[in-house]
Amino acid sequence: MTIAAASHLASVVVMVVVMVIINMLASSNCDQAMERIGKNNKVLAGLKNDYKRELANWEEMKTPERINQALRKHCLAMRPARPEQIVRMQANGEPNLGQYSVAQSRKRNLGKTVQYRKTR
């Protein structure tokens, strides 16, 4: 075997060793990444379960029976708003056209307040 052939063989062996080391490092990094993904997937599944549970609790609390029960518990007397008391708002914060205006409400209530004070 000549020196050139031995040198060529040595460079091939070194290349194979370097490639094996790179492959081992890449495999180790992939295994670590897969472990992290597995842990994150477990956390995500737990959070999804928590979300579903809280959503179900919230839906249950919004039922009329539960609302009335909470009102009684806190000694609050409430009733649904009358249609003229409901104001639908636009995204910009303005009431929809034709809605009962706040100014009209204040004007109407101001008259009642004055009348109430006069009677007392």
Image: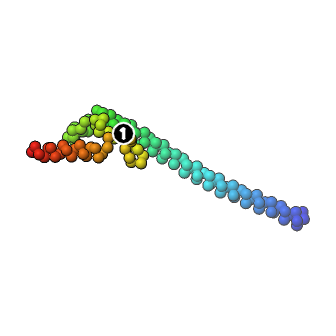
Of 106 and 83, which appears nearest the observer?
106
- Work out whether residue 81 or residue 29 is closer to the camera in this orientation and state it: 81
Looking at the image, which is closer to me, 62 or 40? 62
On the question of residue 69 being in view, the answer is no
Indicate the amino acid at tag 1.
Answer: Gly
Q: Residue at x 48, y 47 (%)?
A: 43
- Looking at the rendered image, the quarter that the N terminus falls into is bottom right
The answer, for residue 81, to whether it is visible in the render is yes
Question: Is residue 29 or residue 89 the one in the foreground?
Answer: 89
**Circle 1 crowding by C-alpha within 10 Å: few under 14, some 14–19, many from 20:** few
The quarter of the picture where the C terminus appears is top left
Please provide percent x and percent y for residue 67: 28, 37
**Quadrant of the rendered structure where residue 84 is?**
top left
Disc 1, SS:
loop
Q: Residue at x 80, y 63 (%)?
A: 11
Q: Which residue is mark 1?
A: 98
Image x and y of residue 60, in percent = 34, 35
Task: Measuring from the top left, give residue 58's x and y in whole percent.
Answer: 36, 39
* Horizontal side, residue 67 vs residue 7: left or right: left
